[in-house]
Image (cartoon, coloured by chain):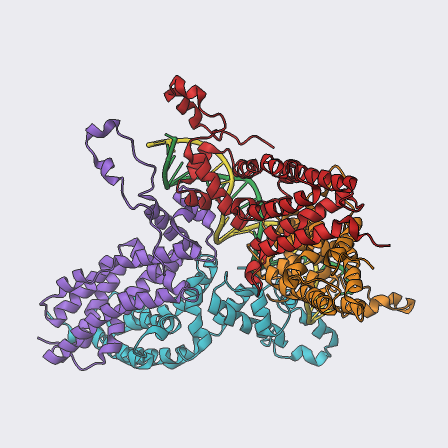
Chain colours: A cyan, B purple, C red, D orange, E green, F yellow
Amino acid sequence: MKPPAKANPQAKRAAKRAVPLDAAAPRWRRRAAARPAEIIDAALTVFSARGFEAATLDEVAREAGISKGTLYLYFDSKTALFEAMALELMQGVVMHRLDALLEGEAPAAALHKLVGFMTHVLDDPRRVAMPKLIIAESARFPQLAEIWLKTVITPLRGRIIALIERGIATGAFRKVDAFETSKLVIAPLLVAALWRQTFERFDDRPSNPALMLREHGEILLRGLAKTATKE
Amino acid sequence: MKPPAKANPQAKRAAKRAVPLDAAAPRWRRRAAARPAEIIDAALTVFSARGFEAATLDEVAREAGISKGTLYLYFDSKTALFEAMALELMQGVVMHRLDALLEGEAPAAALHKLVGFMTHVLDDPRRVAMPKLIIAESARFPQLAEIWLKTVITPLRGRIIALIERGIATGAFRKVDAFETSKLVIAPLLVAALWRQTFERFDDRPSNPALMLREHGEILLRGLAKTATKE
Amino acid sequence: MKPPAKANPQAKRAAKRAVPLDAAAPRWRRRAAARPAEIIDAALTVFSARGFEAATLDEVAREAGISKGTLYLYFDSKTALFEAMALELMQGVVMHRLDALLEGEAPAAALHKLVGFMTHVLDDPRRVAMPKLIIAESARFPQLAEIWLKTVITPLRGRIIALIERGIATGAFRKVDAFETSKLVIAPLLVAALWRQTFERFDDRPSNPALMLREHGEILLRGLAKTATKE
Amino acid sequence: MKPPAKANPQAKRAAKRAVPLDAAAPRWRRRAAARPAEIIDAALTVFSARGFEAATLDEVAREAGISKGTLYLYFDSKTALFEAMALELMQGVVMHRLDALLEGEAPAAALHKLVGFMTHVLDDPRRVAMPKLIIAESARFPQLAEIWLKTVITPLRGRIIALIERGIATGAFRKVDAFETSKLVIAPLLVAALWRQTFERFDDRPSNPALMLREHGEILLRGLAKTATKE
DNA sequence: TATGAATGAGTCTTCATTCAT
DNA sequence: CATGAATGAAGACTCATTCAT
């Protein structure tokens, strides 16, 4: 995937005005200028609603409150804008907090906390939008699926696998295929995110993802528990 | 959603099966009878691979081995073709077989059989393609999501809810929210279908949906069992 | 203008069946087979209603109750059909009857009869359709305008000019430019034909072409009369 | 019929007229202000020559010296362009001048002046083009016929009817049907306009519309006069 | 002779991208 | 930096014409 293109052309300008003091300015505050972020917001809105092909840059520009030509000052092409937007969205997903959360917990308790953590994820509309976007555009942007897999799914799954294997090792969990089971842990989260974007409005009963995830945690814990081994 | 204009369905099929006596009779009249199905096959291939917008009718025609104009003899528009294709795909999903399968089974056994049934669904490439198509095109074709919900998801979910409630009533299952839990039963099936189409090829470990579903069934049964599932 | 193309392919057939007796059959009954005439009727209907470009052969075929392919058994192309139809329509316009009508009449009486004759022309829907068709398609079929001018307008105008000049010579009419005046004689007929096809339906008062032409004749006669010469 | 989307009318016109001082100022901003009018001019040329259906936007664009896409910046569709063009052409027809001309004249003199006025109309090539366009496209654009009838024909006819009735009332004219006669007054004008566009070039004698209309006026006046028009 | 399925050239229309101002 | 007019390549759709049956 190409880098976000010339996404910060204002950088040079800033440098011109910059007094030495700025040298120490926080590095992480890249693209401080509001424009690119505004455009990316608009892009998320439009691309999510229409899909990549059906979205028009006219609409993105209108949504961002700028002219179509201005888009090209910040992004090389429609494709570059989409990629920048998608990458931007994936940035936020950090494992650190999760690691801190699970640190030192017993497997069962950790699993429980993990499922609780998922509920929060569903509250962030930008993060909820990702799965649908990635799935819908996987034909044209396979890199997105790949990057998301590598940066989001695999690390998360890694933690879950480790957790399950630790549980098996400590005798808390019965013997299961940790790899496949890890996907079962995540599946309801994915489905909840997709459901909300696609089917929710047509369903006669409103869904209650928090309750669903609570049931999920409960079933998981009981389903994995060693004691339950029959036969 | 208008049905496709299937021109003279299969008027000449009989001639095709006819005994040698017919040898002197006119051979078969073009491919007219088979055409709509061939086109829908091609459409599924192309729409699945590219999405509705990015797919071109040129490509569909090439895939079907016909000219662009011929498409319009059978379908009124690109949209009509897509809809016809999607509806065609949903036709096959029948609940009868499932009902027969679950008939008279105890809740736990029925749940087990149901999960086993899911494994078969994943073997039908046309059925596997549906979720992704519906999710990807839900912005442009919300009817698809609605129809799929009403004709596939809701009936299936209904069976599961009934099954869970029966289990609770008979004391086999502990008290859970049957509605939310029913979604948990289905979630891994959906995720497996989407996974195969989107992420599978990038994953370093091949997935094993059959094994996953087996674990799913096991966890579900144990997770729902009333006591700590001893017997 | 190309000849009506192979507009009578059935002719040969007929010849085959024909007994010598037929040799004496009326010559003028060309294209006795019904098909071409039916097609031309349909063509007139559709071309008149839609114009040459907007008319589709599908519609002509449907109107004629035959298949599109059959059209090509009788006419080489859409263009050929249109031309054949237009020529066919012009055939009917014969001056003989008019000449017989005016024979031996005094100029004033002849002019009066001529205007009365125009009223009849307006009763033939096929003849009324011609001016509009010719005018509308004059860009694509300038030959039509030319042929119509030569076979219909010029002869008619010639009679009128002769009539006027005779009137002037005999002292019945005052001295006018016979050529330009001849057009004034015809103008109301043309306008009446066009009016009926184009504006009639939007007008709040129904038009009364017969009355109009009667007034026309009266004004003409009085307007041309010698006695009226003032100064 | 939506009006054309005339983009920023003539914002920069002022700059164009500016004195040399402006020489260093930005030259003029494209042709934006003039564009719609240029396009309509080109459209008139092409639509008149070919008719609506046969005209291609490629040709209109070429005629206007712009690209095909640019057309769509100013007009929503081929249809919209045609309608805008036709409406534009009808704008110019004002009755005011005619009313001023006829004001206070005796019926006979007014009629004479009116016929003289018609001669001027024939000098405006854009106005001459209208009848043919309207007649040729009346099938696809019946509104044009309706609008033309209401905004051009009916008002004009109204004046003529009033004039004739006044003449009858004052004893200058004999008793005629004013409604039908009014059409006789206009007919030669219409025919002259149509003639020039359709038949003129094939006629062996050039037509002389001015002379024709003069004869028309003379015949009309004499034909309507009460007595045998002696004075 | 008659059919109608098939074709593909031709048109309208959209929209990402460029560039003069 | 910002604009928005202009472009032209690409795609959906139509329809005259052909041809196997």
Which quarter of the rendered picture does the N terminus of chain B lie within? bottom left
Q: Nearer the viewer, residue B29 or D87?
A: D87
Q: How many marks?
A: 0
The residue positioned 52% from the left and 36% from the top of the image is C77
Q: Residue D58's spot in the image, x, y percent?
A: 64, 49
From the viewer's perspective, tell me whether residue A215 is left or right of residue D178: left
Is B3 drawn above or below residue C152 in the view shown?
A: below
Q: Residue D12's spot in the image, x, y percent?
A: 78, 68
Give the quarter of the image for residue D33.
Answer: bottom right
Give the quarter of the image for residue B166.
Answer: bottom left
Q: Nearer the viewer, residue A138 or C189?
A: C189
The residue positioned 60% from the left and 59% from the top of the image is D145
Which quarter of the rendered picture does the C terminus of chain B lie within? bottom left
Is residue B208 visible to us here?
Answer: no
Is A114 drawn above or below residue B38 in the view shown?
A: below
Is residue A34 visible to us here?
Answer: yes
